């Protein structure tokens, strides 16, 4: 029995009233082929729109002191490289978006369904079961996606921070960067920062999805059941819940993300620093405030990304629902 079906059974069919929010589209209700195909197209577009903020955050995180303001850093990128500077490494990043998102969405939905159903069978109250299922799904999704995202991050971030013209650059594109990193450092070079990525994104994803589920429930109760069929109300609630969850996750995980980024953009070799050494060097360089370099762009990026991704994701699930399942 799916999580949605289990909720119906538990509440005698009154899912919407019992939860105080509209019923979800569960994993079992999705046409998987349509889900992954449409998802690849939708999320590629969203990634393109948000990529400049990621480039700006990365430049701020790896810059030597004194720390420039985000606006000054953005102006410097624009003067040096023009608009193309905000899309350095985008091709490499986009190439990893489709498999990473597919892994993420599959792990998220399958885990939410399995954990939620199991929790209800064990007698856990529905609100707690929903939050626990979302948190577990977040951890599972983050771990699965990082298998693809870490090499993509390493390559794209190396390309982002190059400041020389392409002809004189250390890397001449994503394929060249991938080849040179592999030759210099082996597979380990492509997975530099994998451990800290898991430490950053697994708890962040758990907190994000758990918070998102709770925030949605609270907002839907405030909005009231009269608006459950309103697409505008659904988008507003989902967007506001996601933006709040994104800002909180950005604040909590910023220090680890800064250290991870520094590790991933450094050239390898025998002198490659450990996580602890990179963290100590960062604190020596600029104090604890250095761990929060790029916080503004990251909060803005994650809030906007969260709101955009979630409204797109929920829209995608409804587009991908099997005929007659809603």
Image (cartoon, rainbow, N blue to C red):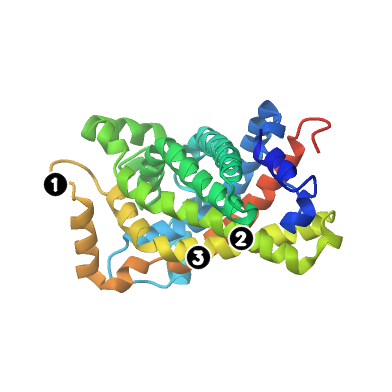
Q: CA distance from mark 1 to mark 2?
A: 45 Å
Residue 4, x across and y down, in percent: 70, 41
Which numbered disc, 1 or 3, marks the residue closer to the eye? 3
Q: Do we see residue 66 in this rendering?
A: no
Residue 261, x across and y down, in percent: 34, 53
* Residue 248: mark: 3
Q: Residues within 10 Å of mark 3 (few under 14, many from 20)?
A: some
Asked where in the image residue 76 lies, by quadrant, the reply is bottom left
Q: Is residue 281 left or right of residue 295?
A: left
Q: Along the polypeptide, which appears first: circle 1 or circle 3?
A: 3
- Mark 1 and mark 2 residues within 8 Å of each other at the beta carbon: no
- Mark 3 and mark 2 residues within 8 Å of each other at the beta carbon: no
Q: Residue drawn at (77%, 30%), measured in percent from left and top?
A: 322
Q: Along the polypeptide, which appears first: circle 1 or circle 2?
A: 2
* Residue 271: mark: 1
- Mark 1 and mark 3 residues within 8 Å of each other at the beta carbon: no
Asked where in the image residue 187 lies, by quadrant, the reply is top left
Regarding mark 3 in the picture, which secondary structure is present there? helix
Give the camera-side residue of 145 and 30. 30
Which numbered disc, 3 or 2, marks the residue closer to the eye? 2
Q: Residues within 10 Å of mark 1 (few under 14, many from 20)?
A: few
Give the camera-side residue of 241 and 110. 110
Which numbered disc, 1 or 2, marks the residue closer to the eye? 2
Quadrant of the image for the N terminus? Answer: top right
Regarding mark 1 in the picture, which secondary structure is present there? loop
Residue 105, x across and y down, in percent: 57, 38
Q: Do we see residue 51 in this rendering?
A: yes
* Residue 214: mark: 2
Regarding mark 2 in the picture, which secondary structure is present there? helix
Q: How many discs mark residues in the rendered view?
A: 3
């Amino acid at each position: 029995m799916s999580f949605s079906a289990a909720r119906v059974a538990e509440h005698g069919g009154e899912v919407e009233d019992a939860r105080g929010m509209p019923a979800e589209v569960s994993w079992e209700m999705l046409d998987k082929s349509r889900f992954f195909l449409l998802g690849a197209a939708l999320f590629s577009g969203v990634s393109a729109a948000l990529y400049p903020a990621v480039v700006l955050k990365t430049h701020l995180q790896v810059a030597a002191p004194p720390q420039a303001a985000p606006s000054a850093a953005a102006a410097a990128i624009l003067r040096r490289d023009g608009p193309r500077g905000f899309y350095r490494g985008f091709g490499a990043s986009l190439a990893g978006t489709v498999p990473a998102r597919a892994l993420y969405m599959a792990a998220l939905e399958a885990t939410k369904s399995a954990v939620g159903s199991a929790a209800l069978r064990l007698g856990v109250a529905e609100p707690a079961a929903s939050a626990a299922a979302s948190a577990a799904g977040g951890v599972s999704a983050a771990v699965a996606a990082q298998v693809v995202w870490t090499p993509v991050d390493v390559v794209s971030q190396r390309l982002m921070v190059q400041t020389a013209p392409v002809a004189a650059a250390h890397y001449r594109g994503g394929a060249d960067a991938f080849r040179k990193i592999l030759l210099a450092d082996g597979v380990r070079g492509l997975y530099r920062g994998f451990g800290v990525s898991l430490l950053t994104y697994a708890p962040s994803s758990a907190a994000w999805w758990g918070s998102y589920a709770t925030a949605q429930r609270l907002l839907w109760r405030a909005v009231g059941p009269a608006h459950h069929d309103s697409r505008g109300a659904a988008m507003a609630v989902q967007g506001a819940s996601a933006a709040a969850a994104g800002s909180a996750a950005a604040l909590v995980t910023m220090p680890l993300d800064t250290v991870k980024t520094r590790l991933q953009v450094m050239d390898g070799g025998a002198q490659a620093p450990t996580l602890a050494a990179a963290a100590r060097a960062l604190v020596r360089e600029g104090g604890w405030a250095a761990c929060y370099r790029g916080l503004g762009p990251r909060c803005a990026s994650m809030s906007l990304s969260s709101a955009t991704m979630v409204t797109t994701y929920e829209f995608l699930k409804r587009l991908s629902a099997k005929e007659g399942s809603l």
